[in-house]
Image: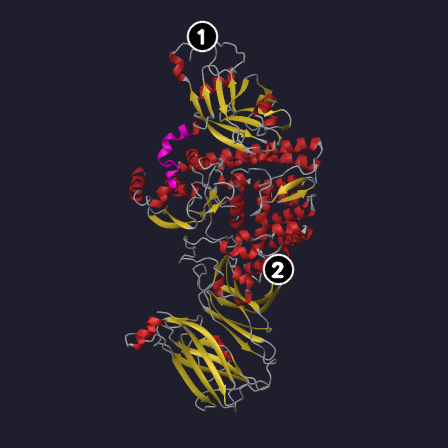
Amino acid sequence: MNFAIRGWSVGIVLATAVAVVPSLHAQPARDSVTTHARLVLSITEFQAAWQRAWRESETTRQESPNGAAQLRLRTPLIHCHPTERDSQFIQTYWYGNDDVVRQKNFQFAQIAGRNSMFAACPTWLFADPSPAAQDERFGRDAALLEPMRVGMHDLRGLLLSELDVAASNTPADGWLSGQRVRFLFDQNDVPGALAAANACKAARWWCAALRGYAQARINEIGPAETAFREMHRAMTPAQRCEWDDVRELLLPTERGAYTSLLCSARVSATEKFWWLSDPLLRVPGNERQVEHNVRRVEIALHSALEQDERYNWTDRFGGDVMTSVVLRYGWPGYTGWGGDYIDDDHTDYLETRSSPRTSPYTTFEYSIDRVHTLPPWSTVASPFSALETSWSMSPDDLLGHPYTEWWPIEHFRTRRRLVQLPEGQHALLRRETGIRVAATITLDHPMLRTGAALDVMMVSSPEPSRVDSLSRRAIRAGTIGVMQGVIPPAPTVIAVEAIGTGTRAVDARARFGVVPPPTLQSMRAGDIAVSDPVLLDVQNGKVNVDMPGDSLLDHMLNTVHLNSRTRRVGVYWETYGVASTDTVTVSVRVATDEQLSAIRRLGMALNLAQNPNREVVQSWTEPDARRGSKTVDGRVPIGPHAIVLNLGLLQPDSYVLEVSVVRRDGTAATGRRRITIER
Amino acid sequence: MKNRFEALRARLTPLTKPRGFVMRCVSCVGAIATLASAPALAAQDTSLVVVEKVRLVVTMIPPKLRIRQPRLAQVGFYSWRLDLKTADGLSIVLASDTVMRTDNIRDIVRGSTLRRCSDGKDFSSLRCRTPMTDSVSVRDDELRIVIRDSTIVAMVRKERPRTMWGSTFEPNGRFRVDRLTVDFDDDDDEKPPPETGMAGLATGQRATKTPYVQKP
């Protein structure tokens, strides 16, 4: 795809598009051609100088005490061969600082080229690429050894002087504006980069993109988002459609559903996609979406010439692979190089398969503090059916590090560490004009220091542009909290989001969709209904089921997965439309809903096998003086109920907890909740 | 330290030989094993520097022209650059004098000038202004530069670098950086200088016969 900027163009390489580098669309004046060519040579020669310094840095690192061992680990990932099966694991070994060799499995998460045999195997950062390599998010020169950074800073200064002179003569040159912003950031000249972005006089959309990029680089997410919105408005529909294309971020099995949509239909789907990908709904701005735009600009800046310091950005040389890598994971934190001899070996591999040399070949390594906030496409299609488990931000070990076997289709690094909270339990209870929503949240994660204060908020978001705060309270990490609020009777996404306070910059969240029942106001006279039953924690002895009321919701169990210690549980539910004088039969039943196989049925008939579908049933008639019941009178009466169930006889399995109410006239209502009995 | 690594290697060797790993590396020609032969492999790409008694012979390849596929000629500058890390820094460039629209290496070389950079910080070839009179020729798409400047030859012979950086640049940002193996032709010490001609001189070129100088 080509975005024309005043005669020049900036190549935006998209997943399916052919990589396009700056080309002469409208022929500029002769002098302009020469000036541009001089600048291209200056940039290219600077990049070559940088590559020399980087290769020398990497060579020096390999000569360090752990260098040879680390290179041995990295070699299979540098030799990333698309002839290997996709998504397989490779075994590598990581050397700890305590002389212990630890085995880790890194997924062979391969991104193969469509027009070459070049492929990338991005992975987690192996170990400290010492000596003295920093994460490149601290700047391009972080990849260099300290002494070389100074020299490169000086050289880049000379290059920037040339670019500045040229920019003063051709302020409307979009290519030049972009390169100035890029190299000023590489130079860590943040004020200069911001000024260059703000001074851009090229095409409106491109200048807005550069401003958004610059603001995002300094973590000003709000202004960045504003600038990127302006960029969208200034784009043509075709540009917008290609820029917003997110197929690269979807699983291969999901891409068909997306690509089958026309551009116009994709707008709404993409808007929902980013809405559900927002790391924290309560925080203004969508950090993930901003990051996506930043990556697009980064790709445009690096592919504006055929090569950057290390990589080739044309499709025939694997540029489509680089685009995918950056679009999915951003710029790597560290790129390990194997040396000339590994380059030559891999070039042999490529050239014998009619694919050109694209050395230097590197690993693409990322810090482990990254999260995958994107939901699966099925959740985008049906957001209000989302479960907490619909998002899998990062499966973490006991230290809060993600399991290295896990490698998602994309990830990004949030400004503050973000962790996913365990699946909880939520309840929807009918009220006169709204729905009371209650959700348990277990503030338990290795990254949350036990006892640390968290500012917890429950929000509701029925559509991409709207977020309503429902309740807010302080809860200590390591404890269980119940958040409650009232929402309108419309499908919505509920999020419980905890912001770490103090010096510990760790946030946490849980998110799910709900489709609420009708309100009491909308029930007709004579209708009856039952809420979905809620499990209560009766272990602490604070719950009095004889005096039921919605205050019992403060004792909601924090899970619907019952282990051996939680087989005795309370169950709370509400009836609606059942007056205190009405005679009703109430049944509470816990049973599996799985069909028995033919062999099992035959075995049971022959008395050779047991029926695994054991069930627990309690049934009684109300009003019953022995059972506590306090009906809240009104046009539609509310009847809170609670009992204690002992599920110790049930085999580990998935069950349905069902509460049924049948009035004497035969009118019936049922509420259900799926629970799991674990070993 | 060595013992520690030997121990680790012993522990890892049987573990790193599952079939998948081996298969993956079959076409990699034993990356680990070829550590010692790295310079030789680099030299296979034909970019190298041979230091003879009175001249340097540099052979470099362009980054793209060897890829024989039809393509549009790019507009811009071509440049070849040789960098040697010394106390003063030595950079020699062969750069086109004007913007070119061609992908014919002979045309490019004809329109280029060999220049020496004033110091190692001239990152842009176009800033290097000191002209050199040495010869440049093209053979089989390879660029061959013969440098007879006695100061440069003496400096290289004194520094005796094992490698030099050779970089080639094409319009539109394509470049290639190679660590060129420097081969000192010291074996000739025992032999008399050739009586006629200069090894490697391009056909049709004139050369002045340089007196044989005893190595200090």
Mark 2 or mark 1, whichever is nearer to me? 2
- Say if residue A271 shows up in the picture: yes
Chain under callout 1: B
Query: Looking at this view, is A472 or A275 the one in front?
Result: A275
Q: Chain of mark 2?
A: A
Give the magenta part as a residue range: B24-41
Q: Is residue B32 in the magenta section? A: yes
Residue carrying label 1: B195
Residue indicated by mark 2: A268
Q: Splitting the image into 4 quarters, where does residue A197 fall?
A: top right
Above-or-below relation of B4 to A259: above
Q: Residue A199 location, x and y as percent?
A: 69, 44
Which quadrant of the structure image shows residue B183?
top left
Towards the viewer: A306 or A1: A1
Per the picture, the main secondary structure of the magenta-coloured stretch is helix
- Quadrant location of the N terminus of chain A? top right
User: What's the coloring here?
Assistant: secondary structure
Instruction: Give the residue type at disc 2.
Output: Ser
Which label is found at residue B173?
A: none
Q: Is residue B170 magenta?
A: no
> Local crowd at mark 2 within 10 Å, few (<14), some, or many (≥20)?
few
**Number of residues whose C-alpha sits closer than 10 Å to that of mark 1, classed few (under 14), some (14–19) or many (20 or more):** few
- Viewport quadrant of the C terminus of chain A: bottom left
